[in-house]
Image (cartoon, rainbow, N blue to C red):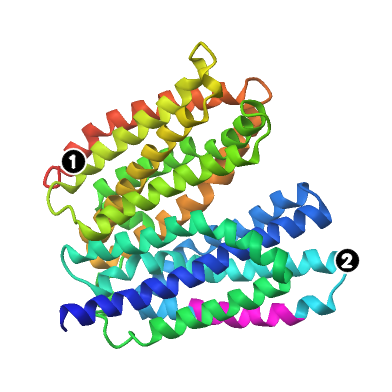
Amino acid sequence: MTETTKFLRNWQVILGQLLAQVSDRMTGLGLIWVVTEKFGENWVTWYLVIGGLPHLLLSPVSARVIRKVGAILTVISSDLIRFLLFFAATFTLRTVTGTQDLMLIFLLIFISNCFAALFNPAILTLPLELEHGTRVQGLTAQLSTVTSLVTVIGPLLGMLCFQQFGLQGLFLITSFSYLLSGVLTWTLRHKTSFVAPPQGEIPQNILQTLKNNPLVSTMLFIFLLMNLLLSPLQVQMPYLAKNAFSGSFNALAGMEMALGFGIFIGGLVLSFYSIKTRELRWTWYFLVAIGLFFLSFQLLDVLPFGLLDSLPLRLGPLAFMGVFMGLANILIINIFQSHPKTEHVPNIMSLVNLISVAAVPVSLIGVGLLQTVTTIPSIGLGCGIILMGICLLSFFPFNLWGKKLF
């Protein structure tokens, strides 16, 4: 296969995922707004819980499915089934009223996220079927860049489209985006290198994978701790916008976009320039940089002379932290893809998906409890200090278990 053919093939996948993820983000925003407006803020918590439950329940199942049928067929099936689901929901929404709306939304998000629980680890495994060697890192970076770009443009497009077309319009847009994504990926199904592993080589469960890969186990644990400690930002940024910047929505949007844009830039760098040696050492550097800029963001709360009120001082650390988050996330995923045995990768990606989805609500529950005894800035500063310590101390397990990569 020529380089041009590979380039076009990969961009088919990237374009499909951009359409599907932007539409999914738009619809998620619309659903949260409808739940909030019609049924109250308390129901949003249940919406998030119901949406996260399939990822917890199907984490072991998703790995088995990917190993059996391959990542690309899992991605295609998940996209096409969600097309049918949202297409049907578009017309069903017209026939329900009152609390039936809420039941339909909860049922829709639960079933949709059942297939998202299969899709998410499959899309992280897919580069292994489409590329080889250092090119795996490049495709992983490109797919990650799509996800980070969605965090920037998804909410903006969601508000515009929701105002213009309503929830039914968002459902219809999302359904056809999933259809197009599935069709684009379907055309590549005969161009993958997937070979189902012999039955004897398939790990029986996730615990076996963790036992056989101590470096991966350590990195997953650090990945979990980082997600838990960074999650309070989702509360801290609205808090700052309200209390430090006179309730300015623009301040909140600016902080969200600074972080998202930084992540996008980090992914973009590795989309065109691969790190081919000492990947774990570079990962450690990036983790330390994340901890440093996160702590810098928190220390602005204790600076004198009213510097707390300076929005540019807040945006700088967030943007740089985002850049290093984008770089670190891609290298971590690439290590998970390339260095364990191939049959272990679906198990690992299932855990990555579970941590990414579950860490936020668990962390925010903890933040809610801590708010009864202390302030949000104090919680953020504590998280910053702990995160900086974890990033520095990760040097020792990385050097112990991953000496060849370090």
Question: What residue would you read off at disc 1?
Answer: 281
Horizontal and vertical percent position of residue 396: 22, 32
Q: Is residue 145 left or right of residue 139?
A: right
Horizontal and vertical percent position of residue 55: 53, 60
Q: Residue at x 62, y 36 (%)?
A: 238
**Inter-mark Cα distance, 2 to 1:** 56 Å
| Kind of residue sitting beneath label 2 | Gly
Q: Is residue 393 left or right of residue 339?
A: right
Q: Residue at x 37, y 58 (%)?
A: 145
Nearer-N-terminus badge (2/1): 2
Query: From what the image shows, is residue 6 above or below residue 237?
Result: below
Horizontal and vertical percent position of residue 58: 51, 64
Q: Is residue 88 left or right of residue 254?
A: right
Q: Residue at x 59, y 45 (%)?
A: 361
Question: What residue would you read off at disc 2?
Answer: 98
The answer to whether one can see residue 51 in this image is yes
The answer to whether one can see residue 204 in this image is no
Horizontal and vertical percent position of residue 26: 60, 63
